[in-house]
């Protein structure tokens, strides 16, 4: 069981590290931590383990879950930062150009009534 958990952790590291956008990252999250995810399936199967092994395997599984969540958060932050950087590079503002003209005054209320 512990070897299976380590294999899941290694696979998660590879997939999360290779994610290029938020959709791939969300797929990775669902693959490992989702309702039918690999890690969730292993945690559900812990009921069949001997009582002496459950605490040790549970601790390893929780450590791996925390690591996967940390990797997902870090990768999401990196992707958001890269997207912002790309957007800022493409949106340039020329501060030397004149601004929008200001409208001066309005129509007098009596003129409005007469019209």
Image (cartoon, rainbow, N blue to C red):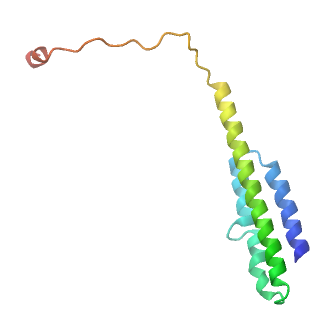
- Residue 16 on image: x %, y %: 79, 53
Q: Residue at x 69, y 39 (%)?
A: 81
- Residue 97 on image: x %, y %: 53, 10
Relative placement, left or right, of 15 versus 73 is right
Q: Where the C terminus falls, by quadrant?
A: top left
Q: Residue furthest bottom?
A: 51
- Residue 44 on image: x %, y %: 74, 79
- Residue 113 on image: x %, y %: 9, 19
Examine the image and state in which quarter residue 29 appears. Answer: bottom right
Q: Nearer the viewer, residue 22 or 73?
A: 73
Q: Residue at x 36, y 13 (%)?
A: 102
Up the image or down, 11 lies above or below 98; here it is below
Q: Residue at x 75, y 64 (%)?
A: 66
Relative placement, left or right, of 73 versus 13 is left
Examine the image and state in which quarter residue 55 appears. Answer: bottom right
Relative placement, left or right, of 50 versus 74 is right
């Amino acid at each position: 069981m512990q070897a299976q958990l380590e294999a899941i952790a290694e696979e998660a590291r590879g997939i999360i590290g290779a994610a290029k956008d938020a959709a791939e990252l969300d797929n990775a999250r669902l693959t490992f931590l989702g309702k039918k995810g690999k890690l969730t399936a292993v945690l559900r199967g812990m009921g069949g383990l001997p009582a002496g092994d459950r605490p040790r395997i549970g601790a390893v599984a929780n450590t791996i879950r925390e690591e996967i969540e940390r990797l997902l958060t870090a990768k999401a932050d990196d992707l958001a930062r890269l997207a912002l950087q790309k957007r800022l590079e493409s949106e340039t503002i020329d501060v030397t150009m004149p601004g929008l003209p200001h409208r001066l005054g309005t129509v007098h209320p009596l003129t409005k009534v007469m019209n």
